[in-house]
Amino acid sequence: MEGDAEHSDAGLRHVDAYTDGACIGNPGPGGYGVVLRFGDHRRELSGGYRKTTNNRMEILAAITALEALKEPCTVSLYSDSEYLVRMMQGGWPRQWEAHGWRRKSGAALNPDLWGALLRLCDKHQVEFIWVRGHAGNPENERCDRLAVRAAQQPDLPIDDGYEQPDTHVDNLFATRHDGA
């Protein structure tokens, strides 16, 4: 395998993952975009939510990229999110998790997503690499277009980790069925 750019020293396949998140307003409708590359193979993924935050979409883009891999891989994950890259490079989410999702300043934000990302990083060997956004990197630009387009779609689903369904209406209907 020596000299094979598609495999790591550990014999795992190497994948380049480009990710981006977008939010129209913050919070507001949001989307994520992913480009995966393995040799000559390429896959694009995107999705969105009706109300979320930019940081949630950046983390969800990384999760989506890693979830798409069918076997353990070494991954170079490129993101223009300094938040995502700095947190993962610094090991902060692992520390928050070890302390019950607490930081010195209070509760950690987005523990649902950080937890999912940590589990995927246990499966794959991931290097998080920051790239400057809107600086002409073709794959980063493509992820941005995918994320923005996803955020603009009609009838986006609820981001359960950010927004809870309107239980007031559900309670109203439950009351009516109970003989009201």
Image (tube, rainbow, N blue to C red):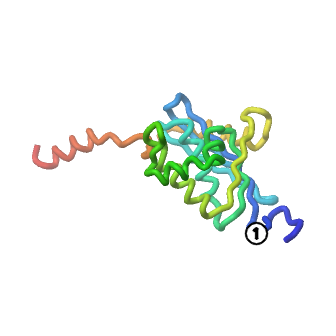
Tell me which corner region of the image, top left, top right, bottom left or bottom right, holds residue 166. Answer: top left
Q: Residues within 10 Å of mark 1 (few under 14, many from 20)?
A: few
Is residue 136 depicted above or below 59 in this figure?
A: above
Q: Could you tell whether 33 is left or right of 93 in the image? A: right
Tell me which corner region of the image, top left, top right, bottom left or bottom right, holds residue 153. Answer: top right
Q: Residue at x 42, y 46 (%)?
A: 160
Q: Secondary structure at mark 1?
A: loop
Residue picked out by circle 1: 10
Q: Could you tell whether 95 is left or right of 121 in the image? A: left
Instruction: Using the image as rendered, state which of residue 98 and residue 175 is in the foreground.
Output: 98
Q: Position of residue 19 (x, y in %)?
A: 67, 45
Q: Could you tell whether 179 is left or right of 153 in the image? A: left
Q: Is residue 92 visible?
A: yes
Tell me which corner region of the image, top left, top right, bottom left or bottom right, holds residue 7. Answer: bottom right
Instruction: Using the image as rendered, state which of residue 28 and residue 128 is in the foreground.
Output: 128
Q: Position of residue 43 (x, y in %)?
A: 70, 54
Q: Is residue 149 visible?
A: no
Q: Residue furthest right?
A: 3
Q: Residue at x 50, y 48 (%)?
A: 96
Instruction: Using the image as rendered, state which of residue 23 and residue 59 is in the foreground.
Output: 59
Q: Residue furthest front?
A: 104
Is residue 148 depicted above or below 157 in this figure?
A: above
Quarter that holds the N terminus: bottom right
Q: Position of residue 23 (x, y in %)?
A: 56, 34
How many numbered dots are placed on residues in this image? 1
Q: Position of residue 69 (x, y in %)?
A: 65, 62
Quarter that holds the C terminus: top left
Q: Residue at x 87, y 69 (%)?
A: 2
Residue type for callout 1: Ala
Is residue 65 depicted above or below 159 in this figure?
A: below
Q: Residue furthest left?
A: 179
